[in-house]
């Protein structure tokens, strides 16, 4: 099948799937990924579901996976951290996305190397998708995007965080800020498609859970399991792209040798290595790639890859729990960084900086990091997206603020248009 036919099928399939109460669409946009198995997965309709609040969420998921040997698609909210550590801070979450949600799909379609397969459900679903026609919805009222932090308050907060670093409380902390819109009326699928067109990324996804939506253009993998091998690929290190080829190459080269960005990256690599030792066969944790530079439409990113062999004594859900929340979105040391995140961030993260993905019947899995993502509740019309950056003692608050705006640029562009 040609790439044009695959693109047409994807367009029809995601529209078809979005008519169901629950659907999950995951698309790699043809990025080369030696750890990934599928270019695209489209799961829709639900046989069964699991929706759990923080408390016994991971145990509930473990029991669910042991009861049903099937495909699972779902998400982990950042605030599952409260189940792992004693972190009592509570903040309002207008989107009200579940802390943990998984469903067993009625229908599942995969696309790999331009071949479409029905992995679950009747093969006639492909004919129905090809025959379907949809009218795009593009005209909606203007969205008034607001920020929870002024630039001045952001800078002052960074300075306070740096005092904690100076005292030795932490070495690094990922500090995030929320942009939001109230009374926002959008067609979530159209917005996702525009975002994916402007910013195609290897772990992007569209997740509809009744009236709640994740519209994600994330470039980051949290954790994947293939056989007995776990792999995590944290991102730390960002530089803008240039439309001028020579300048863009120079920016990319400068990022690869930037000592500040390397220092941030290696701190998180060490944190991930430490998290992995809780699940690994002794001595099997290794760094497969350090300071790799990868290019995306708006930014260059520094990405490292860490892997280990999963211990046969550790349940795969426990391995996810042992690595959660991901180090790239917390800081080091992890617990103290999360405490300070609760103290200084104005918004509850909710599903932002959590993860979504899938678990196969043979218990392999692949989960992203929910960043560069719009979160939307169509009932109360609350729209939110958050952005953050790694704060170290050497960080310049003005530059960190600009980095946040750079990371938000694709979302801002889509929503303003």
Image (spheres, helix red, strand yellow):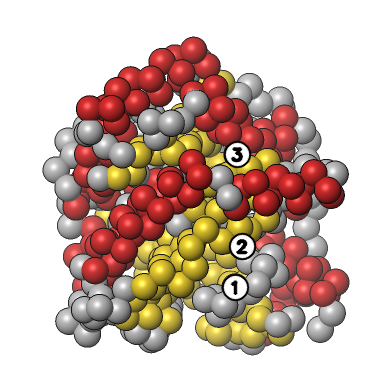
Q: Is residue 170 left or right of residue 223?
A: left
**Disc 3 from disc 2: Cα separation:** 16 Å
Mark 3 or mark 2, earlier in chain: 2
Of label 3 and label 1, which has the lower sequence position?
1
Q: Secondary structure at mark 2?
A: loop
Mark number displayed over residue 43: none
In what quadrant of the picture does the C terminus appear? top right
The reply to whether discs 2 and 1 touch (Cβ–Cβ < 8 Å) is: yes
Please say if 273 is above or below 89.
below
State whether residue 351 appears in this view.
no
Circle 3 residue: 407
Callout 3: 10 Å neighbours few (<14), some, many (20+)? many
Outermost residue on the left side: it is 86
Is 157 rendered above or below residue 174? above
Left or right, 6 with reference to 343 = right
Give left or right: position of 159 versus 130.
left
What residue is rendered at 64% in x and 85% in y? 117
Percent position (x, y) of residue 270? 33, 57
- In front of the other: 144 or 135: 144
The residue tagged 1 is 33
């Amino acid at each position: 099948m040609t790439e044009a036919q695959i693109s047409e099928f994807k367009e029809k399939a995601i529209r078809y799937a979005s008519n169901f109460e629950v659907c999950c669409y995951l698309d790699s946009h043809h990025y080369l990924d030696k750890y990934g198995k599928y270019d695209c997965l489209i799961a829709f309709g639900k046989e069964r579901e699991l929706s759990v609040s923080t408390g016994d969420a991971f145990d509930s998921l473990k029991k669910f996976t042991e009861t049903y040997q099937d495909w699972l698609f779902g998400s982990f909210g950042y605030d599952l951290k409260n189940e792992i550590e004693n972190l009592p801070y509570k903040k309002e979450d207008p989107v009200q996305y579940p802390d943990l949600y998984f469903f067993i799909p009625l229908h599942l379609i995969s696309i790999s190397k331009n071949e479409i397969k029905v992995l679950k459900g009747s093969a006639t679903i492909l004919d129905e998708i090809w025959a379907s026609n949809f009218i795009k919805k593009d005209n909606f009222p203007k969205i008034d995007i607001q920020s929870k932090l002024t630039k001045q308050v952001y800078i002052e907060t960074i300075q306070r965080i740096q005092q904690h670093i100076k005292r030795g409380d932490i070495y690094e902390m990922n500090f995030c800020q929320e942009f939001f819109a109230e009374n926002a009326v959008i067609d979530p699928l159209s917005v996702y498609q525009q975002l994916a067109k402007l910013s195609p990324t290897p772990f992007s996804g569209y997740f509809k859970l009744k009236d709640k939506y994740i519209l994600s253009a994330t470039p980051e993998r949290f954790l994947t399991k293939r056989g007995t091998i776990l792999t995590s690929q944290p991102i730390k290190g960002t530089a803008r792209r240039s439309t001028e080829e020579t300048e863009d190459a120079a920016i990319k080269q400068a990022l690869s040798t930037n000592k500040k960005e390397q220092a941030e990256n290696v701190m998180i690599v060490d944190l991930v290595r430490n998290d992995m030792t809780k699940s690994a066969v002794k001595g099997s944790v290794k760094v497969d790639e350090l300071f790799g530079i990868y290019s995306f439409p708006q930014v260059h990113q520094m990405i490292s890859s860490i892997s280990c062999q999963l211990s046969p004594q550790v349940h795969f859900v426990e391995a996810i729990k042992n690595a959660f929340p991901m180090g790239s979105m917390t800081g080091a040391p992890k617990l103290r960084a999360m405490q300070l995140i609760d103290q200084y961030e104005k918004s509850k993260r909710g599903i932002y900086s959590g993860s979504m993905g899938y678990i196969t019947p043979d218990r392999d899995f692949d989960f992203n990091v929910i960043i560069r993502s719009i979160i939307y509740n169509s009932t109360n019309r609350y729209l939110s997206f958050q952005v953050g950056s790694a704060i170290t003692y050497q960080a310049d608050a003005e530059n960190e603020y600009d980095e946040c705006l750079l990371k938000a640029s694709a979302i801002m562009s889509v929503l303003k248009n």
